[in-house]
Every structure is written in structure tokens, then in C-alpha cells.
Amino acid sequence: MIFKEPKTQEDVRLQVGDGIRISTGPASGIDIVYAGMSAPEVFSLAESIQTSGYHAWAYNLYFPVSQTEIDVGKRRLQVQKVTSEEILLKYVK
């Protein structure tokens, strides 16, 4: 599992189970993990939010493969390619 904050305009390739961290404040962030495809036309990202200390909560988000942009917190990810094994994202803002 990879949790590093990408730089703006950086391409990010995630295989199933790999993730990135998106900063939402000085000591807080959202972890996004690629969870694969639940159906031929649907992919899933698991979002885990650290609330304080060791406390966090998580849920899966489901998107059609035609989805081209995803907003996470105040950040935007551009979906460039998605397969059942990996997803290619561009960190846009």
C-alpha cells in the first residue's frame, strides 16, 4: 500500500490495494485505495478518513468507468484509464 501525496499534475498509477493520501489539513488527510471493479462498467475507490489519533472511518465509492473526474476533499483527480487490475489518475488540483 502506498500513501504519499501526489504533486499537482502528477500521474498516479494504482494497482488494486494501492493508495494515495490527500491532505485536508496540517495533521489530517484522506486515504484513497483502488478497490478494483465490482462490475464490468463500475470501479471502486475505498476512502478512509483519519479523524484523530488512531480513529478513522472508511467506505467504498462506486463510479462508472465513464467518470472522468473525481473530487476528493478540495482536490480533483482526473481518471485517465481504468482496468480491473489498475487505475491511472492525474492529480489536477
Image: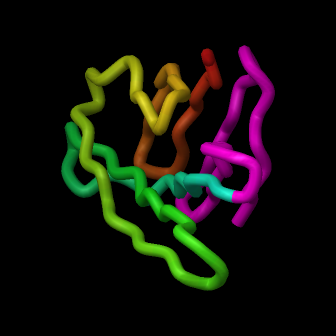
- Please provide percent x and percent y for residue 6: 76, 35
Colouring used for the render:
rainbow
Residue extending farthest to the bottom is 54
Q: Nearer the viewer, residue 71 or 12?
A: 71
The total number of labels drawn is 0
Horizontal side of 86 relative to 41 (left or right) equals right
Q: Residue at x 21, y 38 (%)?
A: 41
Q: Nearer the viewer, residue 49 or 41?
A: 49
User: Magenta part of the protein: which range?
Assistant: 1-27
Instruction: State the quadrant of the C terminus.
Output: top right
Q: Residue at x 25, y 57 (%)?
A: 38
Tell whether position 14 is magenta: yes
Q: Nearer the viewer, residue 56 or 88?
A: 56
Tell whether position 17 is magenta: yes
Horizontal side of 48 relative to 58 (left or right) equals right
Q: Quadrant of residue 2?
A: bottom right
- Please provide percent x and percent y for residue 19: 63, 55
- Please provide percent x and percent y for residue 35: 43, 59
Q: Looking at the picture, does residue 61 appear above or below residue 48?
A: above
Q: Residue at x 58, y 29 (%)?
A: 89
- Please provide percent x and percent y for residue 62: 25, 47
Horizontal side of 82 relative to 19 (left or right) equals left
Q: Looking at the picture, does residue 48 appear above or below residue 39?
A: below
Instruction: State the quadrant of the N terminus.
Output: bottom right
Horizontal side of 71 relative to 3 (left or right) equals left
Q: Residue at x 63, y 47 (%)?
A: 14
Q: Looking at the picture, does residue 70 appear above or below residue 30?
A: above
Q: Nearer the viewer, residue 93 or 51?
A: 51
